[in-house]
Image: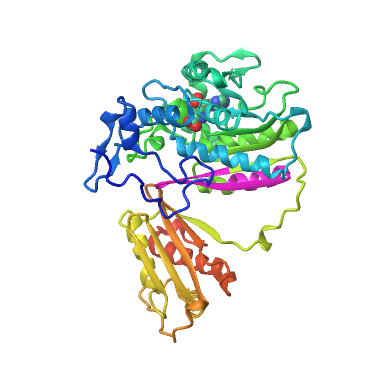
């Protein structure tokens, strides 16, 4: 049955990079099913007539990726069962963010590289997704490194199946001092030994990442990395809502992403100007803070971060350089903050994301403030007058039941409008994002204080003791 309304509504959150191919028209499953018979069995229709796929079925997500790469990027692609299956719109966001970094010229181009952009994809995987997208979308050349035989074999196959880009991509096996890693040694290095990783203080002790893999004299415009995020296989198997595969070698490393990216930073201190930009994806916001402060310690000249949002999943991008920036960068204090986020960790089991979202309404529904909750996008839109914001700042977070006092209603033009979104990161951990909608509001400077107060109230109400501010 074809979709009644093929133009699916764009979600209200800023989910996608504006240059992403899917920014204005998300993948049309009905059209793809009609064009690719192998995809058709995976598509079903919900009661409202929308075509859907079962995101918990690995075969469905892999077939979707295959047809999207073929249909929209003219790329032939496949991966064996169980290997990590990338989502194309999400991976394209990272590519476009790097494109922004390069074109901003904050860090000037290395003249010796000529016009061709040269990237290094750390851990390219069997799917080889970043080199394939970067070369086909933007004509970039890549070295894609990996450590496992299956990743190297399938990455090579995926490159060779695409003669129009194959000249642009080199797949490089990670070796130790020029010697290939024997399979047993490799699995030993990747095995998660909790005792020894505690002893080593979560230090990365696996195969080389950049140092020893980048060759003498090589220069790159950027490196990118989707690191093994997790410290253990138990932690890696947490998302029951999607099935994108992923073997322990792909998803897990001792010390998790924090240790992996810390090693990347240490390598970058030695390799310095061999790369114009060093970048990595990050899965947990708490690690973003840790790694950013690590970067300040090692004396980088610039740090840039971004957020990649897709559905209920949120990831971050971290970029740094050792080259001197060309433009004057405003110190963060001078920049008006219009997007603020914070994590709620150790959230009590009895509180769902919806429960927490609903708790925001009564806080704002007095004194002419209005609140609109959207249960499908997990957002709440708030419009609050200045007096209300001032009152909230006085609110005693510990006195849970105390209602806010009523005050005379102010002119609508004096209202501050903002949106709060809640994302489930993993059980017991939520990400709360606030974004100011009317930046020209006369008291927009209060936005940060209002959100910090909201954070304090939420922690008091929903987080178990260790998470309370000291
Ligand atoms: C999360 S997967 C990412 C795969 C692919 N880039 C993607 O985004 O779907 C991480 C990859 O890093 C590889 N890997 C782990 N340690 C590595 C190292 N030291 N050097 C290169 N690759 C590594 C793993 O084998 C795996 O293929």
* Residue 192 visible to an observer of this rendering: no
**In which quadrant of the rendered view does residue 137 lie?**
top right
* Residue 370 visible to an observer of this rendering: yes
Residue 177: give x, y in percent of width and height: 66, 16
Residue 396: give x, y in percent of width and height: 45, 75
Q: Residue at x 64, y 22 (%)?
A: 213
> Where is the N terminus found, in terms of image quarters?
top left
- Residue 60 vertical placement versus 177 (above, below): below
- Residue 115 vertical placement versus 459 (above, below): above
Was residue 455 drawn as part of the magenta stretch in this picture?
no
- Residue 77 vertical placement versus 291 (above, below): above
Q: How is the image coloured?
A: rainbow
Q: Residue at x 42, y 44 (%)?
A: 25
Q: Residue at x 42, y 59 (%)?
A: 465
Was residue 302 drawn as part of the magenta stretch in this picture?
yes
Residue 399: give x, y in percent of width and height: 40, 74
Residue 31: give x, y in percent of width and height: 34, 35
Task: State the extent of the magenta-drawn residues as a range.
Answer: 290-317
Instruction: Count up the numbered dots.
Output: 0
Residue found farthest to the bottom: 408
Q: Is residue 377 left or right of residue 260?
A: left
Return the residue nearer the eye: 332 or 36: 36
Q: Is residue 164 left or right of residue 333?
A: left
């Amino acid at each position: 049955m074809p979709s009644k309304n093929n133009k699916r509504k764009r979600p209200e959150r800023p989910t996608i990079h504006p240059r992403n191919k899917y920014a204005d028209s998300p993948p049309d499953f009905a059209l793809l099913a009609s064009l690719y018979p192998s995809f058709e069995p995976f598509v079903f229709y919900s009661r409202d007539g929308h075509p859907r796929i079962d995101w918990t079925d690995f075969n469905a997500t892999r077939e979707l990726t295959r047809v999207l790469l073929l249909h929209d990027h003219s790329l032939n692609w496949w991966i064996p069962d169980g290997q990590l299956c990338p989502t194309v719109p999400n991976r394209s966001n990272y590519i476009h963010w790097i494109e922004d970094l390069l074109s901003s010229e904050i860090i000037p181009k290395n003249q010796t590289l000529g016009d061709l952009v040269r990237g290094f994809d750390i851990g390219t995987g069997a799917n080889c997704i970043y080199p394939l997208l970067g070369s086909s979308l933007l004509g970039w050349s890549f070295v894609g490194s990996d450590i496992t035989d299956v990743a190297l074999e399938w990455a090579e196959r995926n490159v060779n199946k695409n003669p129009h880009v194959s000249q642009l991509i080199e797949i490089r096996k990670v070796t130790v001092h020029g010697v290939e890693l024997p399979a047993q040694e490799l699995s030993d290095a990747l095995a998660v030994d909790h005792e020894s990783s505690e002893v080593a203080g979560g230090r990365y002790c696996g195969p080389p990442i950049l140092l020893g893999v980048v060759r003498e004299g090589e220069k790159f415009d950027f490196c990118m990395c989707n690191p093994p995020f997790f410290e253990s296989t138990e932690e890696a198997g947490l998302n029951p809502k999607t099935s994108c595969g992923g073997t322990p070698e792909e998803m897990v490393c001792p010390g998790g992403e924090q240790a992996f990216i810390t090693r990347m930073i240490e390598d970058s201190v030695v390799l310095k100007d061999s790369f114009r930009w060093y970048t990595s994806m990050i899965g947990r916001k708490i690690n973003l803070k840790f790694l950013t402060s690590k970067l300040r310690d090692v004396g980088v000249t610039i740090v840039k971060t971004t957020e990649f949002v897709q559905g209920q999943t949120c990831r971050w991008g971290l970029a740094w350089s050792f080259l001197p920036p060309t433009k004057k960068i405003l110190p963060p204090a001078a920049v008006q903050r219009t997007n603020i986020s914070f994590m709620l960790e150790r959230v009590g089991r009895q509180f769902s994301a919806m429960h927490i979202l609903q708790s925001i309404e009564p806080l704002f529904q007095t004194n002419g403030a209005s609140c609109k909750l959207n249960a499908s996008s997990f957002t709440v839109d708030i419009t609050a007058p200045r007096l209300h914001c001032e009152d909230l700042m006085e609110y005693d977070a510990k006195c849970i039941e105390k209602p806010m006092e009523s005050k005379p209603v102010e002119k609508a033009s004096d209202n501050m409008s903002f949106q709060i979104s809640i994302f489930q990161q993993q059980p017991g951990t939520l990400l709360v994002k606030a974004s100011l909608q009317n930046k020209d509001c006369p008291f927009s400077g209060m936005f940060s204080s209002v959100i910090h107060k909201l954070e304090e109230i939420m922690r008091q109400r929903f987080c178990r003791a260790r998470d309370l501010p000291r």
